[in-house]
Image: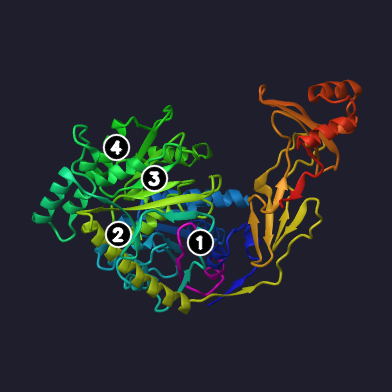
Amino acid sequence: MDILHYSFLDRYGLITTFEEQNHILSYLHPENPYKSLIVCYKVGVGKTYASALLAHIYLVEGFSVLYLSNSLNSIATFKQEYKKALMDSRVKSLIHNIDFMTFTKIFNNGCKDKYGLIIIDEVHNLRENANRYNKIKSILKYLKYPKILIMTATPMIDDTNELDSIIKLSGEENPKILFSKKSNDNDINIKYIGNKINGETLYTSVMKGIQLENYKKSLLSNNNYVYTNTRQSSISSSSYYDPNIPLKEQSSKIYRFMQELDYKSTTVVFCFYVKRGIDFLVSVLNHYGYKPWNINSKGKTYAVIDGNSTSSYTEEVLKAFNSIANYNGSIINILIGSSVLSESVTLFRVKHLHILSPFWNYGQIEQSIGRATRYGSHYGSKNNELNIYLHAACENDYLEGKDIDMWKISHEKKNKINERLKQEMDTHKINVTDHPNFIYPEPDDKLIFRVGNTIWDLTNCFDHNVFKISWCNISYENVVGYNLDKKIKIIGSKPNGLKINFPLPNGYTIWRSCIDDKLRISYISNIKKKYNKRGKIFSNMNFNEIKIISKDLGCLPNSKEIINTLKSQNRYFDKQIEYDI
């Protein structure tokens, strides 16, 4: 598969960050003859962002766009990514020319034959043996002109044949398929907690007391083939915690969870059963002093997102949980989610992630884990650590039980799916031909620097107005990087390998402006919460000012002593931009 990387993006004012995003835009561009593309990138690589950029390209070229997905959450996420993409690129929104439909809505109502591009997101939610799949496939078949972009992070969940059903939706016998080149979680230190059992690292617990009794009864009852009652019994004995019975006899999983719980870090819990899962856990947390989160709450808090959560509440919770101020769980300590939280959501700086209920397939588990392992999801966290707990309740010390059986089956399916994925990846290898007109500025070591294979241009990041230089503001959204190996632009990212010096809080700082190359002195008072001196040119200081500063610093009243004193305090920067060695 050959992909030509060329500079057509400049025509639209669009900028991408990852090479994988450029593959999507290059291959399915309106001027290219290809009809469809299937994208199977891992969670967090930027599928939705790239699809939003592609949608905008079609809109600019005069086409209408249809976006299809399984849930309203996915639609909301796409709208956010479209808004972000245009904000990054500073171009005008055309979102009013995009129609949004869920799979259920198009199944019930069909759609008009007017689209130049149809985006099918989270396509793994369409199964070939379901009526919804066949109806949507038929609708797509009779549309005359649209190009089709199909996206999923988990093309196969239960069976390797599921990829074939996705291929059929494209309308082509041999459509092109894109896979991630590598995992997106390189920057995250992921550790699975527990013991290796049947190829999977599981966090086991042994059921006792009333929970074990109920579990055994469910095994003997007229249960269906998926052991629904037994699986719920593996989580807890009832819907609510009874403080008169030891917790470890009501739920071995929740007992171990509470033992590991750290109220000084962020914890996410996925449980796909509500009453004997989420409701029971909430009642335990309430008993031990945790409170449901609200905007005014303080101390140990939790929040729940499930099928009953409104979109506005979900948005508020995610905003609070993902805020940088919540890096240590001080706002929302524990976020509990059902299956609705496992798709189209990004969770930032998660320290502990618990999966309470195993699945017969690993796709649902991967989707859940993927919420917390997206690219950049751990920026701002200490050590970029993520501990994952795959819970399994056992009948006895010999590690037997339905949870163990389910994890084993899930692991076996995962291995078969990975084998098929490897075959497909070998078949659909990508050869990238770079366009020769990749233009980048020459480094000057003043505002343009080369670090490794990347050139960083900070020209438009600082105020050039002579009256504003002293404020020492920087706009990181105006940083432009040029990756010389991949021949792509990077915008709005903090430049790796460079250190930008600022006036330090709670005292004096001398710094040299990168704009006018003049030495300036600033003073920031933490008490007054504002600048007392905003970068006055140091050589323009009068004798009275020098006397005041010298007195504050406890040094002799002259410029040289002031500089030497601040140097000794590491508050003197002869360069505003330095290589971060």
Of mark 2 and mark 3, the one earlier in the sequence is: 2
Q: Mark 4 touching mark 2, by CB under 8 A?
A: no
Per the image, the residue denoted by label 1 is 63
Dividing the picture into quarters, in which one does residue 513 lie? top right
| Magenta span includes 69 | no
What amino acid is at disc 2?
A: Phe
Q: CA distance from mark 2 to mark 1?
A: 23 Å
Q: CA distance from mark 1 to mark 4?
A: 49 Å
- Disc 3 versus disc 1: nearer the observer: 3
Residue positioned 37% across, 37% down in the render: 303
Of mark 4 and mark 2, the one earlier in the sequence is: 2
Residue 225 location (% of width, % of height): 16, 61
Numbered tag placed on residue 282 in the rendering? 4
Q: Nearer the viewer, residue 539 or 154?
A: 539
Residue positioned 35% across, 74% down in the render: 164
Quick one: SS at disc 2?
A: helix
Residue positioned 44% across, 41% down in the render: 266
Quick one: SS at disc 4?
A: helix
